[in-house]
Amino acid sequence: MVPNEYQPSASVLALAGKLFQLAREGRAEELGAYLEAGAPADLTNEKGDSLIMLAAYYGHAEIVKKLLQHGADPNRVNDRGQSPLAGAVFKGSEDVVQALLAGGADPDLGTPSARTTAHMFGRSELLGKA
C-alpha cells in the first residue's frame, strides 16, 4: 500500500537544504555537480521557491544559466505568485534579468509581474524591449 503523501527522509531533506543554500550563496560549481548527478533543476522549498528563484533573487547569473541549461523553468512562480524575473528586477540584477529573459522568462507573469516591478522601482531599463 502506498501512503497518500510522500514523506522524504531526513537525508533527502538535508540534501535539498544544501542545494538551496548553494543557490543562495552562488556556489555554481558545486550546484552544477549536483545537477550533473541528477538533482532536479526545478526543486522547490516549502514556500514554493525554486532553485532558480533563489539564485535570481540573490543575483547569481551563472547559477541561473546553469539551472536553465538543466531544464529549470524560468516562469515557475512561488506560493506568493512571485516570479524569478520579478525578483531579479526588484534586486536590480541586470545580468540575472538578461539570463532569465534569454531563457524564456515572461515579464508579464506573476504578482506583481517583472514589468510592474520595474515600473514601481524605476528600473524599466532592465527589461529593455521585453
Image (cartoon, grey):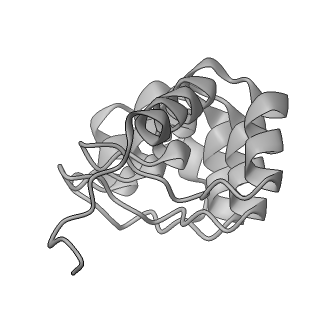
Q: Is residue 4 above or below residue 44?
A: below
Please provide percent x and percent y for residue 128: 61, 54
At x 47% / y 29%, what residue is drawn? 14
Q: Quadrant of the C terminus?
A: bottom right
Write down the quadrant of residue 6 in the picture: bottom left
Seen in the image, is 57 located left or right of residue 119? right
Q: Residue furthest top?
A: 25
Seen in the image, is 106 located left or right of residue 119? right
Please provide percent x and percent y for residue 120: 27, 38
Please state which of residues 52 and 100 is positioned toward the viewer in this rendering. 52
At x 41% / y 37%, what residue is drawn? 13
Seen in the image, is 38 located left or right of residue 129? right
Seen in the image, is 79 located left or right of residue 20? left
At x 46% / y 26%, what residue is drawn? 91
Q: Residue furthest bottom?
A: 1
Please provide percent x and percent y for residue 125: 56, 43
Q: Is residue 22 visible?
A: yes
Please state which of residues 41 and 109 is positioned toward the viewer in this rendering. 41
Please provide percent x and percent y for residue 115: 38, 55
Q: Residue furthest front?
A: 1
Q: Is residue 7 above or below residue 104?
A: above
Q: Is residue 95 visible?
A: no
Q: Quadrant of the N terminus?
A: bottom left
